[in-house]
Amino acid sequence: MEGEFIHIEEKNLNPLLTSGDRSLLLGAVRCPRCEQSFYQAADTCPHCGFQHADADELYGYDPILLSKLTDVAGILRMKDREVIRKELKQFEKKFPQLFFAIYAQAFENGSSLRQYGFWLLNHASFEDVDLERSNDCGILLTIDVNAKSLGITYGYSLQPYLNEESTFEILSHAHPALLEGKWAEALTIIIQKVSLHLKKKHHEVMKNPEAMLSECGQRLPQKEEESQPTPEKLKILSEEKECLE
Amino acid sequence: MKTWIVVLFSYLSAVIWAQEDSLIEEEFVAPVYYDEKGNVLELESLELPQRSEEDWQALQSGEIVPGSSLMGELALEQLFSTSDEQIVIDDEILEILKQPIDDRWPIEIDEAFAGTYFDKPASSYLIDPQSLLTERELEEREGFLNYHAKNSVIDLYVYLFEGKQDIPAKESPHSVLRNFFADRGDVAVAFYHKGRPDRVQVAYSSRINRGVSTEEREAAILRSQEAAGEKSDAASQFESFLIEMSGCLYAMEKKLPSVTLTLETLEKLEAARHEPESTFFEKIPEGVKTFIATVGFLSFLGILGFFGRRVIENGRVYEFPEAEGPAILDAPHAAGVGGVLSYSSAAQPPSLQKTHSNDYLHRL
């Protein structure tokens, strides 16, 4: 996978670009379909052409109403569900801007957990989540019981704090419990590890928010006059993009 | 349930009955008999004494009176005498009876006991080396004096002597107090003669002498003597004396200048009385004590800090700075695709079960 990453050296960028603009070009995310890295600002995956509309076409356009804990596969007992709900509540108490959701289903063969998680977090409405917490602030744990796999998808607000490596490490902690089928224990571990990771990241981001946000192409909300890019900047940005693509 | 209770009760009864039997068996010891030469006789060889035919006839005829050998000739004659003749007692016996009773008893304290009285400090509140009290009386009086000592600042030490015994001229309650109780706080020492409460002598430590007037101190002795005098037997007299004296000492205690002793002082006095040797903690060098205290204090602070931080952390809320950025893949809310873990195999570690990208994409 490392070979597909298109590297941009900072010295090649136009010096007139601000730090936010630079990070916009430097940062990268992974495509849910081809799993390749690409630039933050891309509307479609430069490798496979994937975009949100493709996921809609695959899984549907209608909005879906879910609760934070949706166990379609029936992996949790009533008693376990109460435990997990308490953990989710505790998570929301600690992080008043965020929410954590779990969706367990027995998917058909060939379904991509990444694509489905991507589509679900962009489409679903969570009935038991405050309106103040939009899906931008959500972490969705998707479980495929048939394929015996689980993955994490997260909203834009969590982009600076989570990535593939950190989420995989978090999931790895629950591996022994998952092998034994101890779902309540495994999910509790995952939620607590995510909390711990976010606490650390909170500590880091509070030291220098701008730097950390800029690493993934985000920036602090600016004043109205500052937030509007000048035509000159827009022109430079578009030229840089075209050049790189 | 009832059946089980009956069974249990029966079992317990049987156990108790069996134990009682075993106790009886243990307590029974077969008597051993000896002949005139000191040889042990076997039980089978022993026979009950037999009355001879002659004795039997003499008994029936009245020549032998049962018990006459014990009563003596004089009593036997008096028994069978028909006259009102008075019994004449021998002059020697009368002489003995005429002698003054006091002369029959020693008036000096045996040297063996004098050492216990006057040559070493008292090991208990009641000193009775001559065993003038019965074991039970001694236990009760000592118990009372211990109780008094626990509840009063002034301890009462009582030296018990026989009623007719004289105290050596060089000894007195004051000398005993001076020699052995100078460093034991507030103390009263009493010399009590059994059956003679009027001979009691009491000495008080210097602080009591300073704080309580002479009249009050003498009145306390007098009241105690009067209380003892109301009883007829020596044991009850002694008991009444102690009770009254104890009450008087309580009254004196309230009049002492610094009677409001702190608990710490009392503990020190108690330790001085009962623990003449230094304790293990006292033997530890000061430097080590300071080190232990410092480490203990720091550990306490550490534990306090740890739990305090836990409490603060539990109640802490984490709010991230608001951020803005462009939409990715035209997705309205999320484009963050995290890790995917497979748990299909227990033989492989999680890192080997990380799902891989599709093969066709590698060709790009």
Image (cartoon, rainbow, N blue to C red):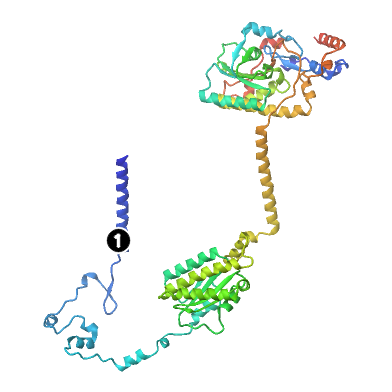
Residue depicted at 19% across the width and 85% down the height: B79
Q: Residues within 10 Å of mark 1 (few under 14, many from 20)?
A: few
Query: Residue under circle 1?
Result: B25
Residue A42: image location, x then y, percent: 75, 11
Helix, strand or loop at label 1? It is helix
The image quarter in which residue B203 lies:
bottom right
The image quarter in which residue A216 lies:
top right
In this rendering, is residue A154 above or below A56?
Answer: below
Residue depicted at 65% across the width and 16% down the height: B356
Residue B96: image location, x then y, percent: 35, 90
Three-letter code, disc 1: Glu
In this rendering, is residue B270 above or below A33?
Answer: below
Residue B102: image location, x then y, percent: 42, 86
Q: Nearer the viewer, residue A237 or B161?
A: B161
In the shown orientation, is residue A29 left or right of residue B260?
right
In this rendering, is residue B165 above or below A99?
Answer: below
Residue B131: image location, x then y, percent: 44, 75
